[in-house]
Every structure is written in structure tokens, then in C-alpha cells.
Image (cartoon, helix red, strand yellow):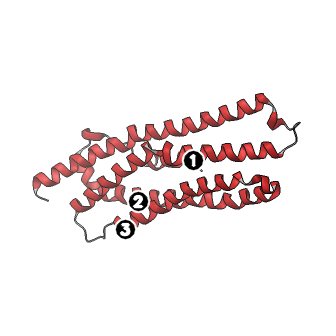
Amino acid sequence: MNWSDYEMIWKRQEIPLGAAADMADLKATFECKRRKLYALLKVRDYSEAGVGLLLSPLFVYLWWQIGSSGWPIGIALMLIFSVCLVFVRERFRIRRMQLGPEASMLAKLEAYLTELRHQRQLVLSMWKWSLAPLYLAILIIGSTIRQSRPTWDISHDPIFIVGFWTMNAFLFWFAWEINRRAVRKQIEPRIEELEKLRHDLTSSGA
């Protein structure tokens, strides 16, 4: 799974200015940025779910090669599928909640704000629904492969084991950190911009 996809959704958009943003510019770019966000979320959902599904036959083949003792790989597959299902659910949720072109700007703005808040929560909780299950899946697959190998295999070397899991722990921490940074620098300032725009629209009676 490519966890940097979450961050890239926000990096592909202009850096928000937050409450300091110009009102005229917010109104002029609102629809374009709104459409771009939904398009990027669509790419993210399909690509992330697709990667998990494409890797599954490889793990099934690995299980078949190991034999009956490779049954823990089935648990790892269920963990990977659980992450894929989150993106499938996201795709159905977004499609169900999207408004038609006839909706007012204020209605679209409210839906946009709701979506951004949801995405913020999704990213901040990704350790629970994505990182932890995937790390556990890697742990299960790695341990199963190691047990199926001869004792002289490098995978039984303590230095290799410690190095491998330390590197994986760092990569997972890095994925967590870059996505938290995306929340701070991209999502939250954009929410501030839209709240400012909403205040202007409701104040003017739009």
C-alpha cells in the first residue's frame, strides 16, 4: 500500500492560506478546487484498493508454496482485505453524498467542509485502520516465511531480524508523520478558508 498517496492528495493542490486567504480568490477558485479534491480522492480509493487486490494472488501463491503450515498467511490476507474495504467503503460513501450541479454554492460548501473534516479524521486515525493491520500482516507473512526456511537461512540471523523490523517500524512511523503533516499544513488551513467563505456567504444571504 502506498501511504504517501494520502499526502500527495493535498500536495497536488495549492498551499492554503487559512483565515488570511482573499475572499474574492476563495470564491473564484472554489469550484475548481472542490472538483479537484473529489477527483484525487477517487484516484486514491481505486489505486489503494487495487494494490491490495493485486497483491493477494502473490500471497496466495506463497501460501500454496509453503503448504499447510503457511495458514497464518490467510490471517494476513484478511488484514490486507480489511484495509482495502475501507477504500471501497469510502468510494460508495462519497458517491452517495455528492451533490448534483444544480446544488447551490452554499450546499456544496457545506458538503465540502464535511468531506474535509471526514478526511482529516480518516488520516489522523490511519494508524488504527491502516498502519497497524498492515504492519501486523507483514509480521505474520515474514514470520511464516522464516519458519518455513532452513535454519541456515539469513532470515534467522538476529541482526537481520532486528534490522528488518526496525526498518519497517521506521517506514510506518514515517508514513504516519507525513500524513499528520498534511493535516496540519493542508487540510486544516483549507477548512479555515472554507469556514471564512461560509461566513461571508451566510452573512450576505447567498
Mark 2 lies on a secondary structure that is helix
Which residue is at a point 61% across and 43% down the rendered structure image?
135
Which residue is at a point 49% across and 36% down the rendered structure image?
177
Pointer 1: what residue?
133
Inter-mark Cα distance, 2 to 3: 13 Å
Is 159 placed above or below 121 here? Answer: above
- The single residue placed furthest to the top in the displayed view is 159
Q: Earlier in the sequence, mark 1 or mark 2?
A: 2
Q: Nearer the viewer, mark 1 or mark 2?
A: 1
Q: Amino acid at mark 1?
A: Pro
Pointer 2: what residue?
38
Q: Earlier in the sequence, mark 2 or mark 3?
A: 2
Inter-mark Cα distance, 3 to 1: 27 Å
Q: Amino acid at mark 3?
A: Arg
Q: Quadrant of the C terminus?
A: bottom left
- Does residue 72 appear left or right of residue 196 in this picture? right
Mark 1 lies on a secondary structure that is helix
Label pair 1/2, CB-CB below 8 angstroms? no
Residue 83 in which image quadrant:
bottom right
The label on residue 96 is: 3
Q: Amino acid at mark 2?
A: Tyr
Which residue is at a point 60% across and 54% down the rendered structure image?
80
Which residue is at a point 30% across and 46% down the rendered structure image?
191
- Give 188 or 96, whichever is nearer the viewer: 96
Residue 151 locus on image (x, y percent)? 87, 37
- Does residue 90 appear left or right of residue 173 in this picture? left
Callout 3: 10 Å neighbours few (<14), some, many (20+)? few
